[in-house]
Every structure is written in C-alpha cells, then in structure tokens.
Amino acid sequence: MAKVSFFIIFAIIMVLNSKSKEAFEQACKTIPGGVNSPVRAFGAVGNDPLFIESGHGCHITDIDGNKFIDYVCSWGPLILGHLEESVLESIKLTLEKGTSFGAPTQLEIQLAELVTDAVPSIEKVRMVNSGTEATMSAIRLARGYTGRDLVVKFDGCYHGHVDGLLVQAGSGATTLGSPTSPGVPQDYIRNTLTIPYNDIDVVKEVCDKKGKEVACIILEPIAGNMGVIPPKKGYLEGLRELADSHGIVLIFDEVMTGFRVAYGGAQELYNVTPDLTTLGKIIGGGLPVGAYGGKSQIMDFISPNGSVYQAGTLSGNPLAMASGIATLKKLQEEGVYQRLELSSERLAEGFRKAAVDAGVPTYHARVGSMLCTFFHDGEVVDYESAKGCNTQRYASYFHGMLERGVYFAPSQFEASFVSTAHGGEDIDATIQASSEVMKSLK
Ligand code: KE4
C-alpha cells in the first residue's frame, strides 16, 4: 500500500511540474546545471527546480500554474514582496528615459544619499552590480589602504564568489559540497585566514600573532549563509576592539542584513561600527545592485580619487537605482520594521511549536525578518554545529512544504525571509503547513 501511495504522489508531482521538468531539460542543454546560480538547482533537496513565471506580493507562480507563498524573496532583495507598486512605478518612469548611459545620473546621488543617511558609518559609497563585486572591491580597498595582504574571514560566512573568499564559504558553496572551491590557486588563498565564527578568542590569537599583517577582518555581522546565526553577546564589540588595536579594517558584509534587520542594518541593531560596509540585495529592490562604503579617509583611496582601481559598465544603472530608491523610501515609512518584527516573530513561534508538538528535534534562529529552522538537536552557533544538521530531514521538510504551497530556500544553509507583503493569512497558512509536515517527519 505504501509503495502505491508513493507512486501516486510521485505521479502527481510529475504532472503538476511537467512544464518545469521540460524547461529544466531544455535549460541543461545550454546553461551549466540548468541554472545561473547553483543553489537554485535543488541539488541539496532533490527533484528538479521549479521555473517561475511570475511573482506578486508574497506569492510566486511557476510555469505549471502552481502558486506558492515565497520565503526566498529572491534571496533577500524583495523585503517589500514582488511588484510592490511604488517600486514598479519608479522603474517604469525611469525606463521611459532610457536604460543606461555610462555616465553619471542624479539617481546615483539619490541612492548614495539614502544609504549614507541610513548608515552613519558610510560617509561615501560606491555602487557596483552585485554583492560579490562589493566584497571583492572592499577587500582590495582594505589592502590598498593598509598596504597589508592578509584577510581574516570566518568559516561558513559567504561573501560571494570572490576567489580569495571561497574558503570554507557558506551558502551554495557548502550546500553543494565545495566550501573551498577548485579553480582558486593556492596563491590566492594563502593570504586568507578562515577561522571559526563566534569565537573571539581565536580572533585574538590570530591578531596577537599576525595582527600587523592583517589588512581586514570581514564577516557577516549576522551569519545568514549557514542558516541564520546571530553574533554571540560581545562578539562584534570584541572584533571592533581587536581591529582598533591592530590597525585592521573591520568590514561588515551587510549584503543580506543591510536594511533587512533594521533600516541601518546589523550595525544599527548591535550598535557596533565597522570601517567598511558592503551592501546588496535590498538596495536594488530586485534589480542588480551592490555597494561598498565607509569612512571617507578610506573610500578616497578608490579611483579616481585614489589609486585603488575598481570599475563597472553598469554600475549605478538608472533602472536599478530607481528600484533601490523606491524600496528604501518605502522602508522609511512609519511602522514598517515593527510590522515585519510582529509577523516574523509569529511565524518563527509557529515553526517552533509545530516542531515541538511533532517531537522533531530542531533549533530555531531569527533576527528581524530573517529566520531559519535548523534540523539539529541542540543549538547552532557556528559552522561546525550548522554542518551537524540533518540535511535529509530538511529536504523532506522542504518538499512537504512545497506540496502545501510554501516555497523555502532549497538548502538548510540559507535564511528564510519575511516581506511586508506576507499577510496574516499567509503566515497562518504557512504555520498550518509546517504543523502538518513536521508531524509527517516523525
Ligand atoms: P551576490 O554576488 O550573489 O549578489 O552577493 C554575494 C553575497 C555576499 N554577501 C552575502 C552576505 C551574501 O549573502 C551574498 C549572496 N547570498 C546568496 C544567498 N545566501 C545569494 C544566492 C545565490 O548565490 O544564488
């Protein structure tokens, strides 16, 4: 009987996703792995990825017409949900004037001023096209500014696919089993020291031994690429002190946390000031934008003021600027983050209760509207404990939720995101689905 029901479910899935399956087969003929970013391929959870037709509010619809409540939100950018009307209107109006000029526009000033007003540690900011470009440029700048070569990063943190940072990297690099990527010459990573996250004593040890050789310490102030792991109490403050005492540039990679956990990012939430900040995701509102910024005395080392070179054909693209400006303006509205906090807290509590009621060992982490259910018995505070998760059970949970119309990241080592478009009924439906799926996992 069990075999029959398995085949019936399998057959239903095949029918429900037939167009996605065909599209995936087609995509694999010309695109490596059929996707333009590895973690989208469902490699860690099994089955083929769904091809999305459209999004609206907190929902996405795949090309087979299946509708889902979306908690990926394009991996973070869509804090206002899909097609928020002021963002859409702003892009449309800008589009009528052209798409790209390769020359400065006033839109770039507008977004730069929104960012520097929101994040006091950023006195000057340079726009690029992705988080990877932002972190790559910030590292180069820190090295140019200090004249030093060593970079300290943390196991499980992910800063994009920068050669020198693809060492014990989180996100898709961990998900797909290559936290240290082939193709990166040993020469590139001999200047990268990767150490455990959330352990200030190890950082102190490194600084005592090599502090004067370290150009920068880069970290996600809230790790979001090994699931969600907040900094331990005093950790960020400890990093600030060590950076100060050794003349090291402290870089907060806020590509994910920027404008996510607070309008001023994690540095506002924890009241710790980095020297440089990298941004992305939300500041583009769904269009490609990255940025790096910080103290003028450091930023003025960047060309054309200084000699540290960095450039980009589409940097500051008008459409992307318009999308980012509209997004940040919307986030300035009264009560936005309070409402996000309430809906995210309710969702997280629902997930926690569903797991407890079903007797499934889980650990729940949340900061603002980024959250994660770890299938792990006991707390998750760093890469080692994150790697101890039951990823098979996560895969079963992922598919159980998908069958019930809820779309999570296809990996245990990611964050889920709540947007302002997630309404009470969406949260209720998600909690109900989680309760059913958790019971099925026992
Ligand atoms: P992008 O180059 O993907 O725009 O940004 C790289 C990056 C840098 N820093 C942090 C903290 C990040 O989270 C990211 C990218 N995040 C992943 C999701 N965890 C992007 C999704 C993907 O790789 O497809």
Image (cartoon, helix red, strand yellow):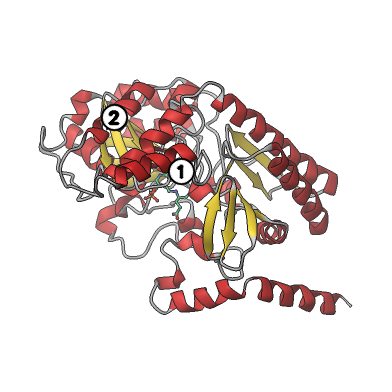
The residue wearing badge 2 is: 110
Name the amino acid type tagged 1: Pro
Residue at 35%, 48% in the rendered image? 288
The residue wearing badge 1 is: 77
Question: Badge 2: few (under 14), some or many (20 or more) residues near its Cα, within 10 Å?
Answer: some
Disc 2: residue Cβ within 8 A of ligand 1's nearest atom: no
Of discs 1 and 2, which sits in the foreground?
Answer: 2
Between 282 and 193, the one lying in front of the other is: 282
Q: Is residue 112 visible?
A: yes
Tell me how many marks there are: 2
Residue at 43%, 35% in the rendered image? 327
Point out residue 66 in the picture as x, y percentages from the top left corner.
64, 62
Report the disc number at residue 354. none
Name the amino acid type tagged 2: Gln
Please give left or right for residue 280 compared with residue 406 in the image: left
For this orientation, the residue located farthest to the right is 1
Rounded to the nearest angstrom, the CA distance separating label 1 from label 2 is 19 Å
Between 209 and 248, the one lying in front of the other is: 248
Q: Say which quadrant the N terminus sits in.
A: bottom right
| Quadrant housing residue 121 | top left
Point out residue 69 in the picture as x, y percentages from the top left corner.
64, 50
Residue at 73%, 77% in the rendered image? 11
Vertical side of 74 occupied by 419: above or below: above
Vertical side of 37 occupied by 279: above or below: above
Q: Say which quadrant the C terminus sits in.
A: bottom right
